[in-house]
Image (cartoon, rainbow, N blue to C red):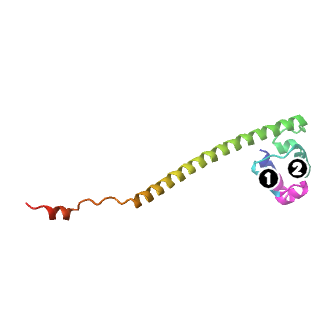
Amino acid sequence: MLQDNLIKLRKQRGLTQDAVAERLHVVRQTISKWEKGLSVPDADALRRLAELFEVPVGTLLGETTLEEPTPDRVAEQLSAINEQLAIRNRRWRRFWKIVGWILLIQLIVFLLLIISSLVLSHHPVPETATNESIVATYDP
């Protein structure tokens, strides 16, 4: 919601992420994170964004009402967005942790296979009797 509004308003004004970052005195990566939904601006940055885009803070947050939200309402919305981001981040961390464990197990199995093949290659298997030697020793 916030991220979509930021992108839409920035593009409507013909601004780049660099231009917005320069006017807000932040780095471009900060604007990128806001637009990707990886983080959210604090209340002061949100206010400055609203001033830059000449819209109410509520519009940035996705409210459809025409009245300006109270600071408590803005704080609640930012808190809700932060909670959603925290949940998503926990899920991604859990996912990458599982992927990491799977890769580690595969690596261990691979190393064990290499070690076992090296051990077996240094211990020759005793020769068994071949068909020729059996035929040669068979005398009816």
Q: Secondary structure at mark 2?
A: helix
Mark 1, residues whose alpha carbon is within 10 Å: few (<14), some, or many (≥20)? some
Q: Which sits in the foreground, 33 or 52? A: 33
Q: Which residue is mark 1?
A: 7
In the rendered structure, find residue 54 and report the number of the disc placed on it.
Answer: none
User: Which residue shows up at 84% across the image and 57% down it?
Assistant: 27
**Residue 2: percent from the left, percent from the top?**
79, 45
Q: Which sits in the foreground, 115 or 98? A: 115
**Residue 43: percent from the left, percent from the top?**
88, 43
**Residue 20: percent from the left, percent from the top?**
86, 56
Range of magenta residues: 7-27
The reply, left or right, for residue 5 in relation to residue 122 is right
What kind of residue is marked 1? Answer: Ile
The reply, left or right, for residue 47 in relation to residue 3 is right
Q: Which residue is mark 2?
A: 49
**Magenta residues, dominant SS class:** helix
Q: Earlier in the sequence, mark 2 or mark 1?
A: 1
User: Which residue shows up at 86% across the image and 41% down it?
Assistant: 58
User: Which residue shows up at 86% across the image and 59% down it?
Assistant: 19
What kind of residue is marked 2? Answer: Leu
